[in-house]
Amino acid sequence: MENRHPEKAISVLLKEQRLYPPPASFVKSALVAGKAARERLQAAAHRSSDKFWDSAARELRWTRVWRKTLDWKPPFAKWFVGGRLNLADNCLDRHLDGPRRNKAAIIWEGEPGETRTITYLQLHREVCLFANALKELGVKKADRVAIYLPMVPEAAVAMLACSRIGAVHSVIFAGFSAEALRERIVDAGAKVVVTADGGWRKGAVVRLKDAVDEAVAGAPCVESVVILRRTGGDITVYEGRDHWWHRLTAKASCDCPAEPLDSEHPLFILYTSGSTGKPKGVLHTSAGYLVETAWTTRYVFDLRDTDVYWCTADVGWVTGHSYVVYGPLAVGSTIFMYEGAPLTPHPDRFWSMVERHRVSVFYTAPTAIRTFLRLGSDFPRRHDLSSLRLLGTVGEPINPEAWSWYRDVIGGGRCPIVDTWWQTETGAILISPLPGATPTKPGSATLPLPGIDADVVDKTGKPVPLGSGGYLVVRRPWPAMLRTIWGDDERYKREYWSHIPGLYFTGDGARRDKDGYFWILGRIDDVLNVAGHRLSTMEIESALVGHAFVAEAAVVGRPDEVLGQAVAAFVTLKGGRTPSPELKEELREHVAKAIGAIARPSEIRFTDSLPKTRSGKIMRRLLRELATGGAIKGDVTTLEDFAVLARLQQDEE
Ligand code: PRX
């Protein structure tokens, strides 16, 4: 991590004075209604967090009850020790004995406009068929299965089929390139890859199977590839290795008992960016993850059986795991799922779907809200959005202007907004309002949920005074926390538990205001947050340096009105290579090919050298200031060559 102290480096956010109490009409029937109810919950969790989580755990169906709530040998936690359950059983079978049996589990809309409704009973059958198909391919308990699918119901089916038989899924966002896919498949040692011929995005077909073919060519661990027919395009089918989904399931039995799994049985690996070039495989396990995702889904989104709940995240991200699939299905909700791009074929696509499917709870990212805000209020106003009763955001700080627009134009002023702070590593939401009980302030994720001991501290772990900036940490383990980094316990210790002694370090800077509310100030390590997605500066730099013409590269984030942060790259070329607009374009494409379109730099600047400290570290802070367009204000005493800075500034002019 660079020597950046949030106390100094992160300026305190503009003072937001507005306070919105939960709307009275919402409080009337909220699951947690009013301040006193919230404080009772907080107090109970504070008295005994074990008892608090025990009672949350009793909401699930267990095949064997746990002996001990938490076994904490820092930094390794085990939750619900000795217990056994199955996630698919909890998300599906459990609902089949009652009125949810024939209730819609998933209402889906494809980008071209077709719709499907799948009841809990039907989803259960699909999952059993696919679980047996996986077994047929030789998948056993603890084997890894990579899933590279568009947002179709089969993505949820594949995940649940894995958890039904105890296989470990690793979902890879379908926007990642073949190279990024290969790296993740190999790191996890996946035996099977589940994909589709393609998926629809912005009116065009994304050729997923081609990417899989390229990735698997460099991944000897893969024995089989399963292909879902989605777009019907031309693809190559490799005899012996490739299998059509529909053929496998046509032969399979629909009888597949859920495997009772130990509480700590690995559930999934999800790769995320850290401060080094190599993505980290965040490992989540079974019972604790489900207990907390189910609890937070119910109480943060105040979900009822009558709701139609839409979380717009892709299953390739953690939000798609916890709040599209596991949490909502565990509580028996109806999920709305959409395959494609938000503005296709028209900028009012989202609002048309809210109207037609009567979506009542809507959860999205600030970057999407800012996009809609810029398009103007006419598009949402063309639609009847009166079904909405609760709105949520996740992924990055939301600016007060976007927050107010969301509340007024989308929520009609009557819907509470839950600004939920969490991470791939936390598995579940940790800081968020309870919508019927926590007054909100635009731009603040408000307070830690019951059972969560979050704080803002200095480098030694001492809480900073209210109003000052510091490091966001969590003091005590929580059930859905990551257990380790796949295959790398040392990196797990180093990345999360070594920065501040004894505490989980989130990588975020934060400030608490006089009411104790948390304001997230953003990442303080070398991680960017582009459109709510985490990207490592090092990963993009190594992609750039992988190009034959590039000698050195430094990547920084610069503020962007829609994306939150945009990727800006400073590049020095090898001797004899000359900068050109074509080369800029080529380098941008090169990064997109190496990682995926989300990492494509918005801006590339050629320079003949980069500012470095005497010990040779690139001074990203200076580059950030340059990329942001401001003058260099900070301390430059450790800069090795002042002339570099002068030249960089000249380039700018
Ligand atoms: O910096 C914080 C930001 O997103 C990071 C986690 O990214 P990822 O693991 O990709 O998960 C995103 C979805 C859970 C955090 O370290 N972040 C997430 N939610 C918020 C946020 N920043 C401010 N406010 C939030 N509500």
Image (cartoon, helix red, strand yellow):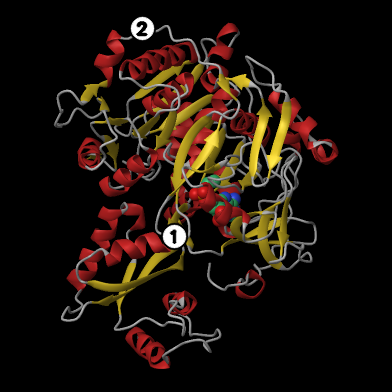
User: Looking at the image, which is closer to me, 514 or 132?
Assistant: 132
SS label for mark 2: loop
| Residue 646 image point, x, y percent | 39, 91
Does label 1 point to a residue whose CB lies under 8 Å from ligand 1? no
* Mark 1 to mark 2 CA distance (whole Å): 45 Å
| Residue 176 image point, x, y percent | 32, 46
The residue at 28%/35% (across/down) is 199
Q: In the picture provided, is 13 more to the left or to the right than 195? A: right
SS label for mark 1: loop
Q: Name the residue beneath numbered marker 1.
A: 276
First in residue order: circle 1 vs circle 2 = 2
The mark found on residue 373 in the picture is none
User: Looking at the image, which is closer to me, 239 or 622?
Assistant: 239
| Residue 592 image point, x, y percent | 28, 55
User: Looking at the image, which is closer to me, 26 or 291?
Assistant: 291
The mark found on residue 253 in the picture is 2
Determine crowd level at label 2: few under 14, some 14-19, many 20+ residues with C-alpha closer than 10 A: some
Q: How many labels were placed on the picture?
A: 2
The residue at 71%/60% (across/down) is 456
| Residue 243 image point, x, y percent | 23, 22
The residue at 55%/86% (across/down) is 635
Q: Amino acid at mark 1?
A: Thr
Which quarter of the picture shows residue 537?
bottom left
Q: In the picture provided, is 89 more to the left or to the right than 342? A: right
Does residue 531 appear in this view?
A: no
